[in-house]
């Protein structure tokens, strides 16, 4: 591997890495915030569960490149606007997490909920103090899948000219250079590993009662 290419392009690699990280984390957080109430609604309305979960899951079947191209026409944005990527990944995040949230809430023991109702907890208190904390391991497991998936999908945005680590792939292809492609692959892999480990640590902090290594 040509180390001189890496050193001479270190600033660009760092810039692309930060852009990739931002384009991954922002839609993931927004998607999680939106998926929690949707999953809660699906959990409490079992008749609508198939419609809500099935309907949102269908969004994940849309090819990412097609969505990147269609969204500018829907949102009225420019093709190179990063907002298109953010919105697309929010849609994919919701598609993956709504089922996870609903099923995670459903896994909470009814006896625990009944006990909370018996001591006077409101529905909101039961959700935030009991159901959601107990469902955290399941939600974080789904979130780990989402983060890795989003890191991969973001690279596709390079095809339409959005700068991030996928740009190293197109650069290597057009210039017939092997090094940028390897650097892009390795950096994406490292991002996925680091973010996954951070989510595992977050899960342990948020669920101190759980057994060590449960995630």
Image (cartoon, rainbow, N blue to C red):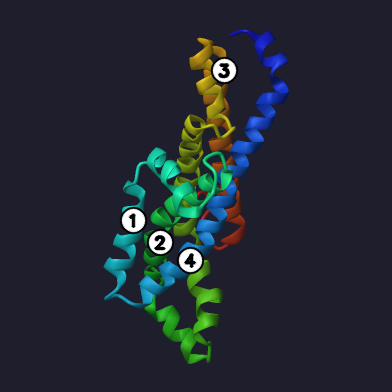
Q: Nearer the viewer, mark 4 or mark 3?
A: 3
Q: Is residue 13 left or right of residue 81?
A: right
Give the quarter of the image for residue 46: bottom left
Say whether disc 1 or disc 4 marks the residue closer to the N-terminus: 4
Residues 204 and 70: in front is: 70
| Sequence-earlier tag: 4 or 3 | 4
Q: Residues within 10 Å of mark 3 (few under 14, many from 20)?
A: many
Q: Position of residue 139 (x, y in %)?
A: 47, 58
For mark 3, what is the residue? 180
Q: Earlier in the sequence, mark 1 or mark 3?
A: 1
Label 2 sits on residue: 98
Asked if the residue at tag 2 contacts the one at tag 3, i.e. Cβ–Cβ closer than 8 Å, the answer is no
Query: Which badge, 2 or 1, is on the more N-terminal residue?
Result: 1
Residue 57 - label? 1
Numbered mark located on residue 36 in the image: 4
Q: Residue 54 falls in which quadrant of the image?
A: bottom left
Q: Secondary structure at mark 4?
A: helix
List x then y, in percent, for residue 214.
48, 52
Q: Earlier in the sequence, mark 2 or mark 4?
A: 4
């Amino acid at each position: 591997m040509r180390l001189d290419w890496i050193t001479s392009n270190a600033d660009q690699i760092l810039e692309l890495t930060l852009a990739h990280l931002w384009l991954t984390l922002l839609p993931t957080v927004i998607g999680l915030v939106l998926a929690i109430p949707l999953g809660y609604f699906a959990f409490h309305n079992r008749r609508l569960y198939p419609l809500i979960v099935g309907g949102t899951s269908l969004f994940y079947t849309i090819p990412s490149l097609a969505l990147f191209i269609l969204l500018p026409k829907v949102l009225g944005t420019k093709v190179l606007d990063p907002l298109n990527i953010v919105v697309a990944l929010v849609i994919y995040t919701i598609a993956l997490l709504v089922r996870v949230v609903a099923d995670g809430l459903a896994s909470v023991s009814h006896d625990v909920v009944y006990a909370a109702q018996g001591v006077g907890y409101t529905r909101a208190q039961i959700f935030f103090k009991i159901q959601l904390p107990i469902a955290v391991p399941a939600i974080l497991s789904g979130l780990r899948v989402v983060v890795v998936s989003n890191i991969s999908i973001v690279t596709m945005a390079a095809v339409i000219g959005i700068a991030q680590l996928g740009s190293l792939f197109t650069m290597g292809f057009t210039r017939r250079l092997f090094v940028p492609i390897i650097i892009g692959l390795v950096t994406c892999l490292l991002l996925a590993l680091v973010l996954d480990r951070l989510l595992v640590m977050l899960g342990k902090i948020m669920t101190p009662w759980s057994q060590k290594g449960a995630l």
